[in-house]
Image: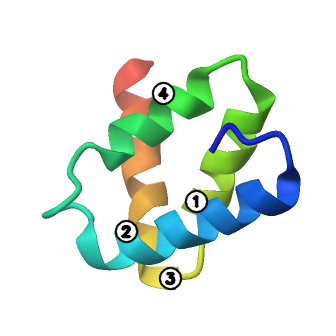
Amino acid sequence: MTESDSRVRATIAYVISSIASWDWPDDWPELFDILMSALASSDTDAVHGSMRVLTGESSQWYTFMFLCLFDFVDTKT
């Protein structure tokens, strides 16, 4: 997700989001932590890539991940 070419980054994010809609959380439990680490990084490409994954192709994935994100942020404050 840290690819500097935005077209490649968008494609990678789409693929990750598509896989995650089937595999997360059971088969890919660490994905949420990976995305949160990328969002907290100073690498703008990583932040953008993570946001693309979080707003990806599956509305169920999108909704669930943002609920987790809000819960994650709430526990940090």
Image quarter in which the C terminus is found:
top left
Which amino acid type is marked by label 2? Ala
CA separation, marks 4 and 2?
17 Å
Residue at numbered disc 1: 53
Where residue 39 appears, as percent x and y from the top left, is 60, 32
Image disc number at residue 26: none
Check if mark 1's residue and mark 2's residue have beta carbons within 8 Å.
yes
Q: Residue furthest left?
A: 26
Where residue 8 appears, as percent x and y from the top left, is 76, 59
CA separation, marks 1 and 4?
13 Å
Residue 70 sits above or below residue 41 on the image: below
Disc 4 or 2, which lies upstream in sequence?
Answer: 2
Disc 1 or 2, which lies upstream in sequence?
Answer: 2
Image quarter in which the N terminus is found:
top right
Residue at numbered disc 2: 20
Residue located at (56% from left, 59% from top): 54
Residue at numbered disc 3: 58
Check if mark 3's residue and mark 2's residue have beta carbons within 8 Å.
yes
Corner quadrant of residue 32 = top left
Where residue 26 appears, as percent x and y from the top left, is 13, 64
Element carrying mark 2: helix
